[in-house]
Amino acid sequence: PWPILAKPAMFGRAILSAFLLPPSPVALRHRVCIGHASHRAIMTSSELAGSPEEARRRASEAAKAADVDFRPCGRLACQEDSFRATLESSRLVACVPWEYRGDPAATGKKKGKKAKKGADGEKSSIPKRGYAVVLDDSVFFPEGGGQPPDTGRIILDDEGVELEVSDAQNVGGVCVLSCPASVREGAAGGDGPSPQLSPPDVALRDALGSGAPSVRQALDWDRRFDYMTQHSAQHLLSAVALGEHGVQTLSFSLQRESPVSYIDFSVEPDTGIEDLRNMMLIIEDSANKKIRQNLPMTPRYMDPEDPDFKEKVRSRLLPEGLTGPIRLVEIGDGVDLNTCCGTHVPSLGHLQTIKILRIEKVKGTVLRTHFSAGKRVGEVLDSTYKRQGQITALLSCTEEEQVQRVERLLVEKREREREIKALNEKLSYYQAQDVLRQCKEDDNIAVVDLGKGFDMNHMILLSKMTIEGMGDHVKGVLILFVTSNEDDPDDEGAFLLTGDVELVDRVGKNISQTLNGRGGGKNGKFQGKGKSIRSGLQEAKQILENCKKIN
């Protein structure tokens, strides 16, 4: 069990030293002792959290129960000054450690769901451990309002020890940072390898053990500025669309893995795509004019009960139960006033430019508009010209000839497909004649290995022609086809059993098991894939013959 803490100096050692011990099968209990500027201990009792989500929830609850002043979400340093990349001398308010070994109970995995991946993106049996941390203020933006969270690091000033910040979340109005522990596999023992802290985490333990050190925060500025730029661009496009064209924004996505974000606008179902494209070009031009004017973009606070709120604020969808002044973001010259918790550029000039790249109707009344802003526009141009150069080289033509060359290739492709289809039908006809002869010679049973180079579609066509060739004499017929692709191992591939409906339905599963495969079917067809399609053929034929005898 974890020790009962009596002194603030024991806080870090008690929390982190447990990470050096093999996990106990019994639920561990501990007392979290939290120091602050006056070094007065704040005591809360909880169990070791079994997941980051649980740890964040408990850290939020501990912060609210603590006798320590801290800034809530909406009033954080990052929300008052979005260009602030560091924060000096913040203090620890709450810290809850967590661990899980990837079992369903710890990770929330449900039956049929894939196991969650760890912070490094890889599945592992080594325990994943970390801390949910609350500071008295935060330069890290907690995910919300459509904007992803900030990442970075926190540094203990007294020791210079760094801890990664991999996530930031708003949990009940409290900004909770997620800091993975740097664990490595130790000596095997008990139920498996025991985790050991890396040298940085051991140093962190010792630093926290000395009391409540001052904490410096430093975020990943490039990530922050990128998302801040796209978020501000979305505000501007949505404001222009509504203010100048009466088009409402339904939703948006800033896209983490792509340089292209999108906004979903509400449009009339009968508006043509060309008219919508022309409208978006006008919106883009108007937005870029405002960027060149370098209009200010500033946060402000207003009470929802204020008469100006109902008249001037664009978005008034507020969380249920919210009271008091709320955060707004205003674009100057009366362009926009909108509720938002996110970070934004201080003036539109920082956006540099906005480019609408593509539009599409995803539903009758939803127009998805893909866009980029700032640095991402350059990234899109770079990737586009690189790809265009590669295509030009492959097609051996100029850039202007690309479309014409691709159109010609598609026409030729369709012609080749028609020719191949005709040849396959002719080949299937002659193959079907061979199968029919085999059935006549072997009591209406045929086992046919087509070799490599065919697929399930060809087997279906062949079985259809064979059955049609029998006319009304299908009763008592059992035909098994097997084939494999060129790159498949010799004994792996696809199979298809066809013939008498009653017999196929009776023996299909047995054939699948014999071929070490899985499959299904009905109405006289049973198909699937197997790992013993050739080594199991002799036994499969015996099953078909026995089925005929029983019948």
Image: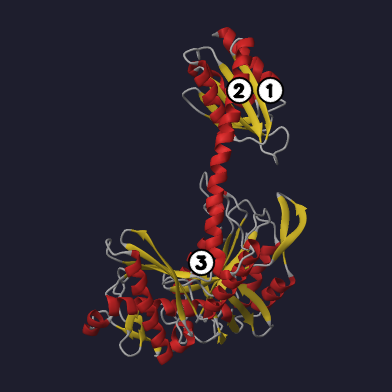
Where residue 183 sits in the image (x, y, percent)?
70, 64
Q: Which mark is residue 480?
A: 2
Dot in front, 2 or 3? 2
Dot in front, 1 or 3? 1
Dot in front, 2 or 1? 2
Where residue 266 sits in the image (x, y, percent)?
31, 66
Which residue is identified by label 1?
Answer: 537
Q: Relative to 44, is 449 on the left or the right?
A: right
Q: Are marks 2 and 1 in contact (CB under 8 Å)?
A: yes
Tell me how far mark 2 sits from mark 3, CA to CA: 58 Å
Instruction: Using the image as rendered, state which of residue 106 and residue 36 is in the foreground.
Output: 106
- Callout 3 environment at 10 Å: few (<14), some (14 to 19), or many (20+)? many
Describe the element under mark 2 as helix, strand or loop.
strand
- Callout 1 environment at 10 Å: few (<14), some (14 to 19), or many (20+)? many
Identified at 55% across, 78% down, the residue is 378
Comes first in the chain, label 1 or label 3 = 3
Which residue is identified by label 3?
Answer: 56
Identified at 43% across, 70% down, the residue is 146
Describe the element under mark 1 as helix, strand or loop.
helix
Q: Relative to 385, is 304 on the left or the right?
A: left
Q: Is residue 267 above or below residue 376?
A: above
Q: Relative to 267, is 372 on the left or the right?
A: right
Whether residue 59 is visible here, answered yes or no, is yes
- Callout 2 environment at 10 Å: few (<14), some (14 to 19), or many (20+)? many
Q: Relative to 519, is 487 on the left or the right?
A: right
Where residue 474 sits in the image (x, y, percent)?
50, 15
Identified at 61% across, 24% down, the residue is 430
Q: Amino acid at mark 3?
A: Arg
